Image: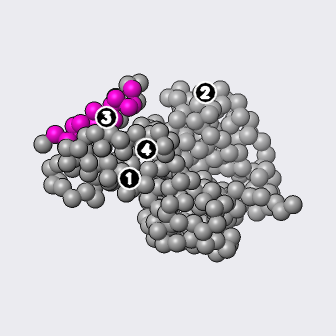
Amino acid sequence: MAEMFIWTEKYRPQKLPDVVNQKHVTDALKSWVKDRNIPHIILAGPAGIGKTTIALCISKEIFGENWRENLLELNASDDRGIDIVRGKIKDFARTKPIGSDFRIIFLDESDSLTPEAQQALRRTIERFSGVCRFILSCNYSNRLIEPIQSRCAVFRLKQLGKEDVYEYIGRVVKGEKLDITEDGKEAIFDLSEGDMRKATNLLQASSTFGKITKDVVFTVAAQAKPKDVREMVGLAVSGNFAEARKKLYDLLVNQGLSGDDVIKAVHREIFSLDMSEEKKLCFIEKLGEYEFRMNQGSNEIIQLEALLAQMGRK
């Protein structure tokens, strides 16, 4: 039986030059890696743009075949408290490196650490900086305390654009010999919103259908098709509330979407609607209001119907 791989891992870049788009970061890191000596590093940016990949590439290039023994990878969203710093992190930091002068601790989603844990981490970084380097990844670097930020080189990664996602998708399509249409690639980009991990997972899931088209991608992602959303919004704006409500129920019941899915789909389509900018701004404001209500526990069907009613107002 052929060995099965998750494509996000199978096609994850193994060296810094292979990382998509983030040249301003990888160029700076390459000289440090070449000298086999790096400072403490903070990698900041949204999900799926290469933070974990860069940390793994650094470890593999510095430590070679010993990279697993010299790298401790932790997710701070799971282990948020002070005990993880006093326990796992400190124990690993004080252990002798294998074939190197230092080890690396990679702390993913470090902005999830509690303030007390961050204070303990600051002291650990100071105490073991001679034998251990820290790489912290986060979505928002301002959520890390200033003493940690000041001890690290901070790199802000760019959001990935369409060309970047297409380049990476091309690697996978070539490697797996897939048949994908242009509108299929565009649908993957639109739904992934620049998140390369999400794009790769969508591509792998869609590949089971054979030819990858836009309809296949939206079916796999359980997302509303833009045409259906535009039709619903158009009916609401024109004052045809009854038909707009029928379309809404089709999205919720027949297509199995959640209220949050519908809100996000409407948000994506509003900017392409043929209406004044003033009206678009009004709709965006209403979307935010009704999304907040649903997140606070309000009935999603009632709130979505109220949203459609608001759109029909002149």
Q: Earlier in the sequence, mark 4 or mark 2?
A: 2
Circle 2: residue type: Ile
Pointer 1 local density, CA inside 10 Å: few below 14, some 14–19, many at least 20: some
Q: Earlier in the sequence, mark 3 or mark 1?
A: 1
Which residue position holds label 4? 251
Which residue position holds label 3? 305
Of labels 2 and 1, the one closer to you: 1
Which residue position holds label 1? 228
Pointer 2 local density, CA inside 10 Å: few below 14, some 14–19, many at least 20: some
SS type, badge 2: helix
- Where is 7 relative to 256, above or below? below
Q: Earlier in the sequence, mark 2 or mark 1?
A: 2
Q: As rendered, which of 247 and 25 lies closer to the eye? A: 247
Q: As rendered, which of 218 and 246 lies closer to the eye? A: 246
Residue in the image at 56% along x and 53% along y: 220
The N terminus lies in quadrant: bottom right
Residue extent of the magenta highlight: 299-313
The reply to whether dot 4 and dot 1 touch (C-beta < 8 Å) is yes
SS type, badge 1: helix
SS type, badge 3: helix
Would residue 196 be counted in the magenta stretch?
A: no
Q: As rendered, which of 225 and 40 lies closer to the eye? A: 225
Which residue position holds label 2? 82
**Is 246 left, or right, of 278 in this rendering?**
right
The C terminus lies in quadrant: top left
**Is 82 left, or right, of 96 in this rendering?**
left
The reply to whether dot 2 and dot 1 touch (C-beta < 8 Å) is no
**What's the distance in space between the residues labelled 3 and 4, CA to CA?**
13 Å
**Relative image position of residue 98 (x, y in whole percent):** 81, 53
